[in-house]
Every structure is written in C-alpha cells, then in structure tokens.
Amino acid sequence: MSNSSIVKWTSLMGLYLIIFWMLVEWLMPIVQLTSTGHLGLFLVFIVLCLGSNIVNLNGVLSFAIKFLYIIWFLMYVYLGTKFFSVDSMMKIAGDFGISVKALIAGDWNDVTDSFRSILFFVLLWMTIYLIHHWLTVKHTVVYFFLTTIIFLCLIDSLTKYNADSAIIRVMVLGTLLMGVLFVNRLFNGSQVKLQAKHYTMLLIPLVLMIIGSSVFAFLIPKKQAIVNTPDSIAKLMDWKNGQNAGIGKIGYVEDDSKLGGPFEEDSRPVFEVAAKVNQYWRIETKNIYTGKGWVRKPGDVYVHTFEYGEDIPMSLKPGKEKNTDVATITLKKDYKFIMQPYGLKSIDQPNDEKSFYIEIDGEKIRPSINEQKVLLPKYSMSYSTPEYSLKALEKTKMSDLRKLPKEYDQYLQLPVTLPERVNNLAKEITKGEKNVYDKANAIVSYFQYNGYQYSRTDVAVPKEGQDYVDQFLFDTKSGYCDNFSTSMVVMLRTLGIPARWVKGFSEGDEVSSDNGTHRFVVTNNNAHSWVEAYIPGVGWMSFEPTIGFDGFDNVLNDVKDEENEGTINPKQKENEKAKEEKQKKAEQKKKAKQEKEQAKKEEKKKQQQLEDKQSQNETKTTSKKWNKVITIFAVIVLILAALGYLTRKKWMPKWLLLKYRFKGKNNITIDRLYNDLLHQLSLNGLSKEEGQTLSEFAKLVDKKLGTDHMSNLTNIYEEYLYSNGASTMDKDKIIECWEYLINRITG
C-alpha cells in the first residue's frame, strides 16, 4: 500500500470516528428521554454500518449482515433468546404483520415495540448511508453538522435533558470534521501528491485553532438563561389541557400525572388468562397525590430481585396454602411487566435466562435479562387469594393506626392545597362507624346513594388551581374509576387511614371452559383502578368504590350470633324486628335500583354494539376503498417507473439538453459534459474499451456517426486535462459539438 493510500485510509478512519461520536450524541438524549435502553446494541449497529462502508464491503453481504443483526436484536430484546429459532422468527413476523395492519388502519397504539425498533434501525441505516455519500462524494457534511446542533439545542431547551456538554463536544467535533474535509478537497483538486507530512502540516493549525477557541469559549463569562423553557412549556401544556381536554382512548398507561377527561372504548385484547376463577389483575400502586393526578417518588427506583419459583417479596400476603391455584397469562400486547393476581406467590414457568425484579415503591414486577427489562409473552403463576375474617375486621380500632411504623406515613401524603371540605365530607360519611373496616366501607357505600354516576364521556378536567378530587366530590359527581378510586384514597388519608391507589385490569370476559379451567380475554376496556387500605392487625385490603363494578368477595362472615343467657326484652325484640324490616326494605330498594341501572346498561350496550357494528362496516368500506386507491396508485407508479427505465435511451439525452441549457454556458464544465456524453454513447452501444485512448475512441464514434465532432470535442477535453483546466476554451464551440452529438445519438 502506497504512502498516499495509507494517508487516505487513515483520514477516512478519522472522519468515521468523528461521525460515530456525533451519532452517539444523537442517541444519548433519545435513549434517555424515551427510556429505550440497549444503547450499546444500537452503537454496535452503527459500527457495523460504518465499518462496511470503510472496507467497501459487497452490497449484498453488507445488507445481509445488517439485516441479520436487526433480527437478532429483536429476538434478544423482545423475546429473550440469544440464538435464531423458527418460533422466534414466526413471532417477529407476526408482530410485523400486526403493526403493518395497524399503520394502514391508523391505529398507532397497536404498533408493536419490535416494529418501532425496526423503523428506528432503518432510520439509522439510511442516515449513515446519507452521511457516507456526503463524505465520499460531496466531501461536505454541513447539513448533518447543522442538524445535529439544532437538534441538541431544541432537546436542551424543550426537555429536561441537559445538552450543555454535548453541544460543546459536537461543535468541536463538527469543526474538526469540516476542516478535515476541506483539506481533503484541497488535495483532490490539485496535482500535489498526498503525503502524511503535508496532510499533518495543514491539520495542525486547524487543531490548534479549535482547541484555542474552545478554551476561550469555555472561560468567558456567560449570562444566565432568561427563562426556564421546559417549565414554561409545561405550564403552557397545563393551560391547554385545562381549556380543552381531548378525548383519549381507554387502556393502561404509565403516566397518571394528569387525570380526567373523556375517553373512547377500545375492545382490543391485551392478554388471555387460563384460570379457575375470574378476578382483578394488579399491575402497580402509586402513592403521591399531587392534586391533579398520581406520580412516583422522584429519584432512584429500588428493587428486589427474584427467580422463577421463588417467593415474591410483596406487601400483600397470599391466602392459605390449600387454596393455591395456577393462572397462565398469554400476552396479546407487548407489556414488559407481570399481570398479578391477588395472593401472588411465585412465577413458575422455568427459564434460566430470565430473572425478575419488583419495584419496591409501586410493586410492579418486570422480567429482565442482564438488568434490562424484556418481554415475557407467556407465563404461569401460583397464587392463593387472601381471605379476611369479618370478626377480625370489626375488632380494628382507629387508635391502632397511631402505632404503625413510620414506613406507612407515605400512604398518608396529601397536597397542602387540598380543600378542607374534602376532610369534612370524609368525617361526615364515617362519623357513625367505629372500626377502620367499617369506615372504609362507609365511603364505598356513599358513592352508591348520593347522586354520583359512572360515565366515560361526561368527565371534566380540573382547571388551574382546582383539585381533581374536590371537583369530582362537590362539582361534577360524574366520572369513571380514576375519579372514584382517587377520591376514596384521599378521603381515607384525611382520616389517618393509610391507603394507596392501584392500577391494573378488572375481570375479563369468559370465552371458553374445559375441565374446570376457564379462559378469559382481558381487553383495553378492562383497564381499571381501585383502592388498597391498610387495616391494623389485618394488612393491606382491596376495596372497589366505582359504581357498577362487583369488586372483591374476600371477607369470610365468621361472626356468630351469641345467645343471650337471660330473658329477652320484648321491646328489644320488637326493635330488632323493625330494624330487620328496615334493612330488608333498603335491600329491596337497592336491588330494584341495581336492576334498573342494569337494564339501562344493557340498553346502552346494545345501542353501542349497533353503533360499533355500523362504524366497523363504514371503516371496512373506507379501508377497502383506500386499499384499492393505494394499490392502483402503486401499480401506476411501477408502470411509469418501468416505462421510464425502458425508454431511458430516448428521453435522457433530451433531459440533458434541457438541463444544460437551463444552467447557462458559464455554469457548465467540459469535464461534466464529456462524461455525460460518454455515458449516453455507452447506453447506445458505443462503449469505450479498456486500454483504448480517448482519441482512438473518438475516431471510432466519428466513423459510426459520419462526423468529426467527437474528435474535435475530445481534443478540447484532452487539452483541458493536460493544462489542469488552465487552457482557454471556446464554450460556444464545445456546446455546439456536444449538442450535435447528443442529437445524433437520439436520431
């Protein structure tokens, strides 16, 4: 390898190393802000792309390597497998098909994470190819440099990501990159032989200038920012949400900081369950109420790790060992966490590669590989539903709450802005109850008989300065599970009863049954929230305050009527009888009301099903029409492309004539004219053979065409080459010869 080749190769390596670090500056904020993870694996892909360009790898081989790496990434990250397998490939292909259908239908929420990763890899691939073109053909990356600076400035200004150091690094790297490319252009445009010492002499002043300017920029005093942009944007978004709440779509989401607003139903399946009984499915709890919604405690998330078959360290204790059952979950949506039945004991399906961790603050359980959360598409769990003694519950005292350890204080947190009337209402509701359990049940019952209604559409968003719970309890009295559950948690806390907000899914719909095992389908419509309260001496216990939901049947009535040893007072007996009659009438009234509500729900459900059916028919018709339009358009484009390719010999010369006439003779170079002419001659069967001089080829062309214009043009071109562009040329004569030859080619 010659000295010149070594310098060129070293220069290219240096350029790609700078590009690599600039791409890292792109990926860092994307990974951090989107919680993507696996930064190292994305960097490996970038190295593969850049490396194949450096060694000029065969196109087919380069494509195969990158394609196989993307497939391996999807299997490793989303399926937890390190080696290729038919099942994994089928799963990825299935996700791809589902995502394509979702894109065509406009259902962006149904696009799988694996498909999003594919799109991200394709974007990286295209970006690196474009950068390679800029480096090797255009010898400039000014667009990439400027775009990187703008991107980092926007990220730094509009998000919580601190890009101060990143912007400085990119400025230094980008300036060095532009300088190296400028030096390369100097050598490419001259006859000076490229040597290491010449190259180094030109780069040293550039490096010194960059270092000096960077140090100067770092040391000079700088003004503080006039405004904290992320906070300002957050306030603007708060105002927008308060003024105009859009209609969302029901389903599980992790962000609960802004509750309220209507939403649409969504019957798409989330997971299937094979179990003996239908039940609620717990995902996580949240403890900090802000007045607008629920957030996690800021800072690091502490976890406990465990393996398959091990007891899971949870605050909720399982029931009796003899009541242990097994439930099998099959995911239909790519959720990287475990659906928990109440009384969860262990995850049983063995897999040596995966382990689990439970987040201590919210008790969300995630499968993981090498500390990275992964998807577990199917798993089985052992559980024993906890049961509570009514006798023990009725013996609980409010005074016992003051004896609880400090760790329960977090479940009493309330914002200082909470209106006092919320606390007053809680006291009014529970004033006749003595024990903790009855006070909690009194709040559940309060929602049933005091004008509150369940609605998914007539739901308000609290305005600025307005509390979410206060608005629901006193102003709107209309809402869905989040309104009822959050209100109950807040009221319990005002009474000094530890409580937490729980998210998950309610009972699904049974679709089949076989030998005592039932199969249930849980959809987005089953996304739900409820309450867990701490009962002294008993533990955490679940409550269902939302109107229309059955809740939990986990209390054993073990309270026995004690026989009185003395005579029964007739008046006392009469009072007891009257009390029983009153209770009976109340139950009948309650039953009649429930039946009436159920009839309304059935009617509404039928109406909704009819509307959904009509909507689906309209959607299918519209989808078919659009599919037809897209197909016709694609066929037309393909036909036009094929015709264009087949007739290129006819139209390309005419296009060249128009192109150069539009440019004007002052902007035309003989070098470009001559090379375009050689290409057109080659398309028409007149190719220059290897070892043949330009003069010999020109004479052959003139002989074929019966002219001397090719020889005249070649003489001018050779004179231009040997004089290094310094010769004086008659451009009118050049253009005349060139146009004549182009016209002769086309006939």
Image (tube, helix red, strand yellow):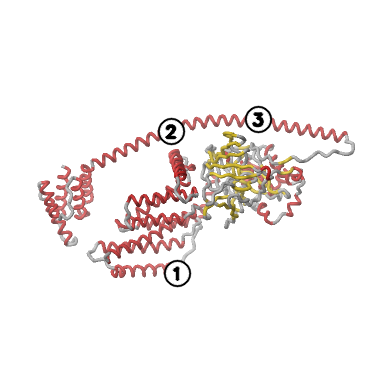
Q: Residue type at mark 3?
A: Lys
Q: CA distance from mark 2 to mark 1?
A: 63 Å
Select label 2 or label 1 by which is in front.
2
**Where's the N terminus, which quadrant?**
bottom left
| Mark 3, secondary structure of its residue | helix
Residue picked out by circle 1: 219
Q: Residues within 10 Å of mark 2 (few under 14, many from 20)?
A: few
Q: Which residue shows up at 40% across the image and 59% down it? A: 22
Mark 3 or mark 1, which is nearer the start of the sequence?
1
> Residue 622's mark?
2
| Mark 2, secondary structure of its residue | helix
Question: 112 or 598, which is in the foreground?
Answer: 112
Q: Residue type at mark 2?
A: Thr
Q: Position of residue 544 (x, y in %)?
A: 66, 41
Are the residues at dot 1 and dot 3 in contact (C-beta closer than 8 Å)? Answer: no
Q: CA distance from mark 1 to mark 3?
A: 76 Å
Q: CA distance from mark 2 to mark 3?
A: 39 Å
Establish if 724 lies above or below 293: below
Q: Which residue shows up at 46% across the image and 47% down it? A: 114
Establish if 169 lies above or below 711: below
Mark 1 or mark 2, which is nearer the start of the sequence?
1
Residue picked out by circle 3: 596
